[in-house]
Image (tube, coloured by chain):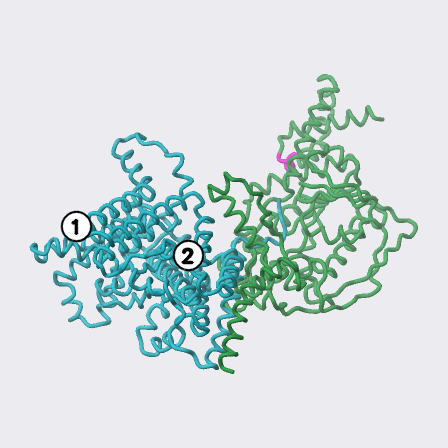
């Protein structure tokens, strides 16, 4: 069940919110957990058993670690990490491994695994990272293990952050699971709904419009694709993925606020970054901080004697895993390697060069590098990625006046470009603060409410019209 | 107070989420139904297998999406936004022209010639039509080719420039009209007539929000057709008389059919709609012919008006040569279940009606099928006579120079060798003689 669907928006969400608001404080966590389980079962009816087993195991390991000395804690943590990673590999990467083994062998030595098609690993990458961070934090004693299984299960499975994050930390969520009455007030509920609808609009009214044209251009035969069109497509994709993902994060954060949870921010104008290092401080922030704390830091500590080489190797390993984590596939691994490469160059010399070049040049350069990287993220395979990169840099112009791109695409494209950078400037930041963070004045709230209602109606119109493009008559 | 207002706003937000489900369940507010042709997802029946595969959930989500409360309002709001801000119509193949004149792409494609079938294809079909006209004439059945008007030809000044930029030298309509005239076919070119009357008609012949001729337009068109048929059969048909024209701000029937499919919140600017009241004078000395008409949707208005009952002695409407409707209330049948030859031979007139948008597939296979059937008919006829009899008649024709020159002309028009044409004529003469 995706957030931008009628069934979620008009059935699941209102029923959940009504029950949640009517429930006594001491039952709210149970209501949220029940809703999260229902959300999961709808999307992955059989995989819930795998996830519940994994949740039970990790909760139990956490409780056991509390009673152990340092060495015992470490062993339990390592055992937990191994099982979590193995589960992730089995359920997320079996298909990828099978394909590669068959490719290397030159024939289908590994056949289909029939039961796999019934096990949809819904949100399992996020679930695994949540659980790993829990075990590590308990081992490091930066967080206490959950006493109640239901609280731990809610920490892992809470539906707003289940599929696409943000990735929470135990230290941030545990106090809120115990008592969030301080956050559960009308201002947060209003702000949460406003943020939710803004996120929905980013996804439905911006990302989907751009995505439709990106898909069309990516499906074009080679002869039709020229340099301007390739650049338009990849720039549109850069905005599509940003508005899609940040829109989802806004919806998750908004839903959290409506139910008294403060979830971590995930994006901070990433396309205004002045280096790749800066980009990863702004893009999918909860993932990048997770990678930093649980992967890069331990690796670089292990390799501290190797100096800068150790840092470079740690960065590359971290980002190869980052690419792989996003989706099983070689193009994603190359995307991770591309980012790792530029981050490593940052460490070696690039940061200094970019600093000297000035903010505008550094921002444009970083945006260019990021955009080229998106080719690997979007392409179906290396062949398509290669074609796109060739077209982008071969300066071929077909001279076709009509690209088939409509007025709504260009308008949304321009709006996306503006909205991507606006909060880097003072007025934009002020506006964002007003909408997302500060308590609005009454008049501001009323104006904003009108905007939100219009946006909601437009989003519902767009969602409910998916597949509804009528013909005047049926013509055999 | 401040807190109360904030709570009120939040209740309003919650109502946004809750009310559609309430509307779906109780249908509290009567909504204007959506226009156009579309298919709703049926409520899926639950099966464990589909549930485990996630297929049931997908179908159910689609079902919910198609049936949410206030869907009509949500959809119309979004369509209005796209239309007003970007001039984008959210319906298949619709083009928004200048002054909010709506077109279907096929009309523009024919007008600009981008759907031109090519001269060879049309020449071949025209030759077949010529053959059919001559053959059917001999059997007392008159073939009429009816070029219905087309919106792109009627409002060329409203076509968006990007389409006019790809204007070709020839279009299906222009080439068909020219070639059919040259081939001596019985043509009724309403497209040209509509264009000539555009600025003379007291009421609109086309509306900006419709893709078909206006109610006033088709009434004139039917009247003209009746007069034309009267000339062809030598006896007039019952006369149509417009007794009154009612003016309205509300469109009826297909007068704003594309606009309806756009599903907008607000109506588009339009001229007054004119609805003529018709009286049919079935005086003496009139003859109602029986008619078979193969036509596109342009004939629907005429057919469903019931007027054909009064001017024709039966009108079988072969819709796109796929479904056959009868004006006497018989149930619809599939065209391919009927014997095309015997159906044609029962009629006084066979009319093939097409608007410009459909000329790329003129006749929808009817012409070719009938042609083939007639050819099979020649073969069957030949088996009824000895080769000696046929040869004798062929020689007779060959020895008549005047006849031969007629035969050569027919052979040229029918795109058949002269020998074949002589043989066909010989067979026809023999069969006529036997009948006598």
Q: Is residue A12 magenta?
A: no
For the point 33% across and 53% down, the residue is: A126
A213 left or right, relative to B222? left
Dot 1: few (<14), some (14–19), or many (≥20) neighbours within 10 Å? Answer: few
Looking at the rendered image, the disc whose residue lies closer to the viewer, 2 or 1, is 1
Residue A70, compared with residue B270, is above or below; it is above
Task: Please tell me whether mark 1 sits on a helix, a strand or a loop.
Answer: helix
Q: Residue B186 at what x, y percent from top left?
A: 72, 45
Tell me, for residue A159, which label it has, or none.
Answer: 2
Q: Which residues are magenta?
A: B411-415
- Which quarter of the rendering shows the C terminus of chain A? top right
Helix, strand or loop: magenta stretch: helix
Q: Residue B410 at what x, y percent from top left?
A: 68, 36
Which hue is chain B drawn in? green
A414 left or right, relative to A106? right
Tell me, for residue A71, which label it has, or none.
Answer: 1
Judge by depth and name the residue closer to the eye, A251 or B404.
A251
Q: Is residue B414 magenta?
A: yes
């Amino acid at each position: 069940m995706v957030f931008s669907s009628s069934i979620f928006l008009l059935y699941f969400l209102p029923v959940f919110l009504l029950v949640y608001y009517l429930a006594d404080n001491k039952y709210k966590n149970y209501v949220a957990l029940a809703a999260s389980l229902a959300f999961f079962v709808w999307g992955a009816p059989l995989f819930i058993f795998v996830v519940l087993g994994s949740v039970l195991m990790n909760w139990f390991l956490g409780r056991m670690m509390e009673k152990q000395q340092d060495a015992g804690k470490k062993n339990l943590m390592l055992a937990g990490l191994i099982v979590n990673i193995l589960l992730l590999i089995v359920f997320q990467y079996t298909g990828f491994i099978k394909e590669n083994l068959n490719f290397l062998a030159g024939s289908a030595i590994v056949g289909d695994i029939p039961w796999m098609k019934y096990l949809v690993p819904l949100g399992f990458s996020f679930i695994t990272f949540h659980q790993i961070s829990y075990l590590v934090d308990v081992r490091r004693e930066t967080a206490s293990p959950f006493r109640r299984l239901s609280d731990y299960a809610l920490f892992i499975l809470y539906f707003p952050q289940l599929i696409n994050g943000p990735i929470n930390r135990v230290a941030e969520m545990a106090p809120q699971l115990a008592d969030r009455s301080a956050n559960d007030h009308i201002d947060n509920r209003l702000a949460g709904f406003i943020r939710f609808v803004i996120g929905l609009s980013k996804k439905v009214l911006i990302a989907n419009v751009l995505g439709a044209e990106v898909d069309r251009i990516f499906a074009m035969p080679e002869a039709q694709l020229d340099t301007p069109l390739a650049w338009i497509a990849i720039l549109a994709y850069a905005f599509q993925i940003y508005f899609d993902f940040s829109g989802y994060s806004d919806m998750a954060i908004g839903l959290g606020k409506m139910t008294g949870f403060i979830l971590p921010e995930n994006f901070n104008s990433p396309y205004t970054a002045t280096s790749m290092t800066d980009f990863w401080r702004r893009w999918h922030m909860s993932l990048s901080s997770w990678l930093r704390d649980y992967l890069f830091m331990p690796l670089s500590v292990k390799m501290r004697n190797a100096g800068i080489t150790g840092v470079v190797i740690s960065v590359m390993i971290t980002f190869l895993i980052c690419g792989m984590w996003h989706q099983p596939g070689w193009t994603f691994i190359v995307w991770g390697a591309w980012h790792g490469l530029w981050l490593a160059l940052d460490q070696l010399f690039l940061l200094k060069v970019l600093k000297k070049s000035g903010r505008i040049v550094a921002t444009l350069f970083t945006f260019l590098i990021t955009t080229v990287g998106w080719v690997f993220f979007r392409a179906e395979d290396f062949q398509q990625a290669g074609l796109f990169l060739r077209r982008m840099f071969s300066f071929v112009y077909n001279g076709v006046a009509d690209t088939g791109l409509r007025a709504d695409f260009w308008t949304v494209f321009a709006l996306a470009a503006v909205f991507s950078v606006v909060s880097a400037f003072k007025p934009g930041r002020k506006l964002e603060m007003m909408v997302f963070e500060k308590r609005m004045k009454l008049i501001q709230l009323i104006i904003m409410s009108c905007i939100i209602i219009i946006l909601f109606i437009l989003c519902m119109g767009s969602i409910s019209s998916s597949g509804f493009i009528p013909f005047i008559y049926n013509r055999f | 107070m401040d807190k109360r207002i904030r709570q009120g706003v939040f209740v309003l937000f919650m109502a946004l989420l809750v009310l559609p489900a309430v509307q779906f369940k109780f249908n509290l507010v009567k909504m204007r139904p959506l226009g156009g042709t579309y298919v709703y997802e049926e409520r899926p029946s639950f099966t464990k297998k589909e549930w485990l595969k996630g297929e049931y959930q997908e179908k159910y989500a689609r079902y919910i999406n198609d049936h949410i409360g206030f869907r009509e309002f949500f959809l119309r709001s979004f369509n209005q936004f796209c239309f007003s801000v970007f001039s984008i119509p959210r319906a298949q193949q619709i083009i928004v022209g200048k002054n909010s004149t709506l077109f279907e792409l096929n009309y523009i494609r024919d007008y600009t010639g981008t759907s031109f079938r090519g001269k060879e294809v049309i020449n071949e079909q025209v030759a077949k039509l010529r053959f059919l006209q001559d053959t059917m004439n001999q059997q007392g059945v008159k073939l009429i080719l009816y070029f219905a008007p087309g919106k792109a030809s009627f409002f060329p000044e409203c076509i968006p420039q990007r389409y006019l930029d790809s204007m070709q030298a020839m279009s299906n309509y222009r080439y068909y009209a020219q070639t059919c005239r040259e081939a001596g076919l019985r043509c009724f070119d309403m497209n040209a007539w509509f264009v000539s009357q555009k600025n003379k008609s007291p009421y609109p012949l086309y509306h900006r929000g419709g893709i078909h001729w206006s109610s006033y337009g088709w009434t004139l068109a039917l009247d003209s057709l009746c007069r034309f048929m009267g000339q062809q059969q030598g006896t007039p048909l019952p006369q149509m008389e417009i007794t009154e024209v009612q003016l309205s701000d509300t469109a009826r029937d297909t007068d704003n059919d594309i606009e309806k499919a756009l599903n907008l919140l607000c109506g588009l600017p339009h001229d007054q709609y004119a609805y003529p009241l018709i009286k049919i004078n079935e005086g003496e000395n009139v003859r109602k012919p029986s008619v078979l008409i193969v036509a596109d949707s342009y004939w629907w208005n005429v057919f469903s008006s019931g007027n054909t009952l009064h001017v024709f002695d039966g009108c079988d409407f072969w819709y796109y040569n796929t479904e056959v409707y009868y004006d006497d209330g018989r149930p619809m049948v599939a065209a391919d279940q009927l014997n095309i030859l015997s159906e044609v031979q029962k009629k006084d007139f066979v009319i093939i009606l097409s608007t410009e948008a459909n000329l790329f597939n003129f006749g929808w296979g009817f012409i070719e099928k009938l042609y083939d059937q007639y050819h099979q008919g020649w073969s069957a006829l030949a088996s009824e006579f000895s080769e000696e009899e046929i040869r004798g008649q062929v020689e007779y024709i060959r020895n008549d120079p005047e006849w031969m020159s007629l035969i050569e002309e027919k052979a040229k028009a029918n795109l058949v060798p002269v020998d074949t044409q002589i043989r066909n004529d010989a067979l026809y003469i023999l069969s006529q003689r036997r009948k006598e």
